[in-house]
Image (cartoon, rainbow, N blue to C red):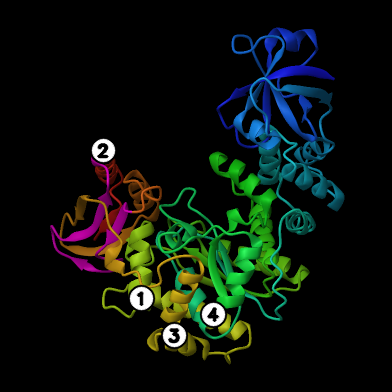
Amino acid sequence: MFRLIAKLIDVETGGMPVISLNESFAKENDFHGMDRVVVRFKNRYLVAAVDTSEKMLSKNEIGLFEDVWKKLKVKNGDEIEITPVGKPESTKYIRKKMDREELFDKEIRSIVKDIVDEKLTDVELAAFVSAAYMEGLSMEETSSLTKAIVETGGRLRLKKKIIADKHSIGGVPGNRVTMILVPIIASLGITIPKTSSRAITSPSGTADTMEVLANVSFSIDELTEIVKKTNGCIVWGGAINLAAADDKLIRIRHPLSLDPEGLMLASVMAKKIAVGATHVIFDLPIGQEAKLQSLGEARHLEREFKRLAERFKMKIETLITDGNEPIGNGIGPNLEARDVLWLLKKDRRAPLDLRRKSVLLAGKLLELVGYAKEGEGEKIADRQIETGKAYQKMKEIIEAQGGNPNVKPEELELGEYTCDYEAEKYGIIANIDNKALAKIARAAGSPIDNEAGIYIHKHYGTKVKSGEKIFTVYSRSERRIERAIKLMKELNPITIK
């Protein structure tokens, strides 16, 4: 055990906690980079990885990064104890997976527990993700991973016989079906606690768009009260800690651009189980620029979802939908929120494709939970929009989540700097590059800037004249709009034939 004087470093590392030692002190006492130590202050402690610095610290000092000193509640000059510890046993199981061996249930549980307890470095987590990508996970491994993620996170316990849910694998800009489907289902008295994600590589996630209208971060107790009051919610899943291990794995997966099927299946299913979902509708969009590019890929994923759902006694329905172009007109938080409000208010500016898809999915979910007979779900779902009951329910949900239920779509401001993408010739729009549009919207500032994004005037299959506006880019920053214009010219996201 060593006693050292705390020196606070105002930098947050993220991931596993890290401390810094003087390089000479580390050599003298046989500490090496990424060794693990238990760091203690009073009755608080954590496991951290070692980094070294010759210039920043004297031999009797320990550098504590922001996430460490906040957890331990340490001040500059406090005396800190550190004790060397070995690598966790779960690192052996990660190596075992890298050696192409199948992992047992207890081994996967060990890995997940150490992920949650922040005992694994980013390098070790990346090794696990890479092994899952290279070697794949069996259905047994995927099932064990799902259970472990659920058991190490929080759970929503609503004590309802039927709890509905919906999930889309993503990859399609716009596509704010959740924000239409939830109020439709909840307005019929069916419980639907929807946890959604923020954008990682897209111009906006459902949580980003909903946050334009209401708060999306709640504790489990607060969320329980909201759902009891309104039958539904649309919140950010990351704030509730329902699947803490999965959030940490996602943080590693995305910079590597790796999305191993087993990890994705476990991630989705764990979050559904964590909210108590009994009946779930899955949206699997396919298209040239979507995550799934062929019917064969979609059918395979459909089978895997059903196999996994059977193990957890969950009833699911999968729908393979068109992912060849954005859904709705708006791409970006405020633009998407306007689409949602216009649709629920039955405004003439509402995107019809978003309404059709929302009604389709909501209808299938109503049939799945037994509320509607086969073939009648869509009529019931559409009726909830026509009668205004879905809009009334959305207002209730917005108010329960701390927002203004009477907000008008026109009050949601858009960036003052704009640029139009115009048709270069007469013809029909034959292709819209989803990934290119997403990149342009992000270059304009979305989703960090709510007012940034793209508004689509003409969709796939539409006739256009030379010089006619196809979409408009919005930004609050002159620098960002210039960057978006440059990307627009480079990527040329619209094909006209």
Relative to 407, 131 lies left or right: right
Q: What residue type is labelled 4?
A: Ala
Mark 1: secondary structure: helix
Crowding near the residue tagged with mark 4, few <14, some 14–19, many ≥20 C-alpha atoms within 10 Å:
many
Identify the residue position indicated by label 2 in the image: 479
Identify the residue position indicated by label 4 in the image: 186
Q: How far apart are marks 1 and 3 (CA)?
A: 12 Å
Q: Is residue 344 above or below residue 116?
A: below
Looking at the image, is mark 1 or mark 3 earlier in the sequence? 1
Q: What residue type is labelled 2?
A: Arg
Looking at the image, is mark 1 or mark 2 earlier in the sequence? 1
x and y percentages locating residue 423 in the rendered image: 18, 57
Split into 4 quadrants, where in the image is the N terminus? top right
The residue shown at (72%, 27%) is 49
Q: Which amino acid does label 1 sit on?
A: Leu
What range is drawn magenta here? 451-479
Q: Is residue 422 above or below residue 187?
A: above
**Count of picture labels:** 4
Looking at the image, is mark 4 or mark 2 earlier in the sequence? 4
Q: Is residue 177 above or below residue 132?
A: below
Relative to 460, 211 lies left or right: right
Mark 3: secondary structure: helix
x and y percentages locating residue 468 in the rendered image: 15, 61
Question: Residue 389's mark?
Answer: 3
